[in-house]
Amino acid sequence: MFTGIIEDIGIVEDIRKSSGKWEFRIKTVLAKSGIREGDSVAIDGVCLTSTRIGNGYFFADASLETLNLTTLREKKAMDRVNIERAMEPSGRFGGHFVMGHVDGLGVIKSIRPSGDSLFFEVEVPEELTRYIVKKGSIAIDGISLTVNEQHGNIFTVNIIPYTASRTTIGDKNPGDKVNIETDIIGKYVERFISVRSERGITKEFLSKYGFLKGD
C-alpha cells in the first residue's frame, strides 16, 4: 500500500521492450539505500516490483496489461516520473490509501493560475465518476490530492507550489494523459451496498447498523 506522498522524482534511463513486457531502468536516489530487490514501488502511481538494483537505479517490469491501462506505454528515455516506496507498518500516514492499481486514464482539460497555486480540470471515463466526490481523495500519477469540485466526468484540483515543485504534475500541459486511482474506500462502500441490496435491506438490517432507533 502507498500513501500518495511522492518521495522522489526519478528519471527513466532506459526501456527494453519485448513481446511480453517492458523493462524500465529508473534512476532515483532511493535506489542507493531505500529500495531492495523485490520491493513494491509506485512509478507514476503504478505499483511495480523492483527486479534488480544498480548504482543509483533499479529495474522494474511492466506487463502488457499494465502498459495498456496506464501512461507507462507513453514513457521514453529521460522522462521524469513520480516515485514512492510501499508504506512500512511503522511509517507515518500522510496522504490517503493508495493501492497502486490504476482505475483509468484521465486527460487534463485545462490548467490556470489560482493565486499561488495551479487549478487543474481533469476529465475521466464516465464509469469512474461514481467514486469521485467533492473534498474526497484521488490519486493523479500517484499523487494524493483533494477533489475541489466535480461536474459530470470532470473534476478539479488545486496544486500548491510545494506539490508542483516536488512531483511531475508541474510539468503537465492541457491534453496530457494521467493515471487516475480513485479512493478505495468508495469502492468498498459500493460493494457493501450492492451485496446488501441483492440480499434485501430489511428493518432488522437497518436497526443492526444504527439507521433505526429503538422504540
Image (cartoon, rainbow, N blue to C red):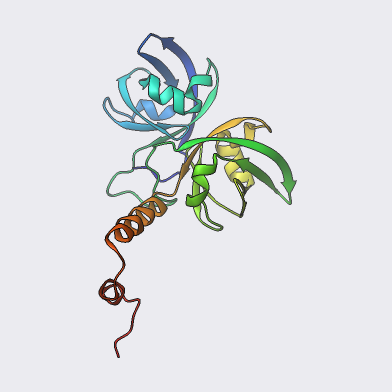
Where the N terminus falls, by quadrant? top left
Q: At 54% across and 42% down in the image, what residue appears?
A: 126
Left or right: 1 in relation to 173: left
The quarter holding residue 43 reads top left
Can residue 38 be seen by looking at this rendering?
yes
Task: Please name whichever residue, 18 or 171, is drawn nearer the observer in this view of the structure.
Answer: 18
- Image check: 25 left or right of 106? left
Q: In this rendering, would 146 be left or right of 65? A: right
Q: Residue at x 43, y 52 (%)?
A: 94
x and y, in percent, of residue 158 in the image: 63, 49
Question: Where's residue 109, x and y in %?
Answer: 68, 38
Position above or below: 140 against 80:
below
Which x, y percent locates residue 148?
61, 55
Q: Position of residue 182 (x, y in %)?
A: 46, 46
Residue pictured at 62% horizontal, 41% vertical: 122
The front one of 124 and 24 is: 124
Instruction: Give the total number of marks visible in the rendering.
Output: 0
- Image: 184 above or below 69: below
Front in this rendered view, residue 118 or 124: 124
Return the residue nearer the eye: 8 or 40.
Answer: 40
Corner quadrant of residue 86: top left
For the C terminus, which image quadrant? bottom left
Q: Could one spot residue 144 in this view of the protein?
A: no
